[in-house]
Amino acid sequence: MTGFASQPATRRQFLGLTAAAGLALVSGCSGREPSAAGPPTTGGLRLTAAPMRVDLAGHAVPTWGYGTVPGPEIRLRAGEVLRVQLENELTEDTTVHWHGLAPPNGMDGVPGITQDPVAPGEGFTYEFETPIPGSFMYHAHVGMQLDRGLYGPLVVEPRTEELSYDREYTLMLDDWRDGMDDHAGHAAPAGDTDPDPADTVSFGGRAYPLLLVNGRPPEDPAVLEARAGDRVRLRVMNIAADTGFRFAIAGHRLTVTHTDGMPVEPTTVDALRLGMGERYDVLVDAAAPGGVWQIGVQPEGRGGWGRALLRYTGSDASRAPEVGERPAELAGQLAVYDDLLAREPLALPNGTPDRRYDLVLSGTQIGGQSYPDADPLPVAEGEWVRFTMRNTSAKWHPMHLHGHHFQVLTASGRGPVKDTVAVPARGGEVTFDFLATNPGRWLFHCHNHHHMEDGMVRLVEYGRR
Ligand code: C2O
Ligand code: CU
């Protein structure tokens, strides 16, 4: 079982916990250790965005972060209030976006759209209820700040956990280049690199010399401990700016239980594909004959390699797999949207959608327009809205909608509920439905941050009726 001992915090307890929890959170997830089940269950903390150094296998490189990379894991229980005091010690404006949550619009963290940017030396308090459990992320939402270390995991635990497991870990996958120019051996050419042959699954094209798992390069991997016989829950999150990943564990299969935090009928596969912004929760049975096993993170459509280790307690770490060893499972059966069945489908009415948008994704345009020279996509409160995206470009685009969960339309009629969906290149098509029940001005954009900066953004806008 999970062993979360905490009681649901009352409002008063919650306020009382704030100061202590801030400290606990900062020491609880240092980026040196994979975050483990256990500590702090509260939403009260301070996040300070500041220049810092991160230790990459012995090289201390400069970046911007929230004290550690990834930032502290924020954990609360469904129905609690998330309260985060952001302090900006950067030399630029910043904000925090709560990726996958559906807060009131003013708490969504998009500068110039949902709030004034937080200037250097200033602060901002984010405060809202988190009724929906799941695996989420937070990250800066100004320019390319996400490309640095300004991100972290956010887990909302259900009031009653339906899954049974013995321990859990969060794994954040990232592409990295901060400070890398200084280190020969890690250097890579700048600019676009991919010629993209027709069968390549490519989510981006920029050069990233390193891939990190929980802030650690392959030479100094995070080690996940498990006892033989344990059932381990992994929350795998892609926070990269420009890289889609294939994920697998040598000698183990993965039972997918959630995508983007939302439950699906458990389905067992060998590997996951994660576009930027996507998350998968999986259960892994530690049923191999002991040892140390490679957790492989293979970028889609480009070179490079990331990894962590799964170590059976008591096994000899000196017998760990070679840095570059590729689990055969990476080429095995992949979790695909068509095979995922929502356990809690959206409450869509009978009949047909109230409003539809057919949007061609071409280059970095959505529906032929490039933000900010783009019209908002109007909807009305209460409507059932359908987006169909057809991607004519050579890159896969992971499309993310703020403030809502949507349901992917698949042949089963019960496709997964998500907030980020990868649309395949060269004619790939994805349709999703959502209910316009959270009025405001919401971003709909590609989660390749270079594409986003190039204008691959539209606004979904509606007021209260
Ligand atoms: Cu992670 Cu605008 O999103
Ligand atoms: Cu894109």
Image: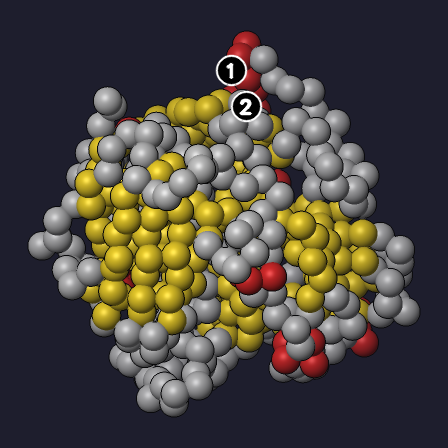
Give residue 71's position: percent from left, percent from top. Answer: 49, 46
| Camera sees residue 427 | yes
Q: Residue at x 63, y 80 (%)?
A: 331
Quadrant containing the C terminus in the rendered view: top left
Quadrant containing the N terminus in the rendered view: top right
- 69 vs 306: above or below: above
Give residue 238's position: percent from left, percent from top. Answer: 49, 59
Q: Please report whichever mark, 1 or 2, sits nearer to the chain's N-terminal start.
A: 1
Q: Residue at x 44, y 86 (%)?
A: 199
Q: Residue at x 23, y 70 (%)?
A: 362
What's the CA distance linking mark 1 and mark 2?
Answer: 15 Å
Q: Residue furthest top?
A: 12
Disc 2 element: loop
Q: Name the residue nearer the viewer: 12 or 334.
A: 334
Q: Name the residue nearer the viewer: 160 or 152.
A: 160
> Which amino acid type is marked by label 2?
Gly
* Residue 79 - label: 2
Disc 1 element: helix
Colouring method of the image: secondary structure
Q: Residue at x 53, y 52 (%)?
A: 413
Tell whether 173 sits left or right of 114: right
Name which quarter of the figure residue 439 lies in.
Answer: top left
Tell whether 114 sits left or right of 62: left
Give residue 138's position: percent from left, percent from top. Answer: 43, 44
> Which amino acid type is marked by label 1?
Leu
| Camera sees residue 58 | no
Give residue 59's position: percent from left, percent from top. Answer: 49, 68
Tell whether 384 sits left or right of 294: left
Disc 1 crowd, CA 10 A, few/some/many (<14, 14-19, 20+): some
Q: Which residue is mark 1?
A: 15
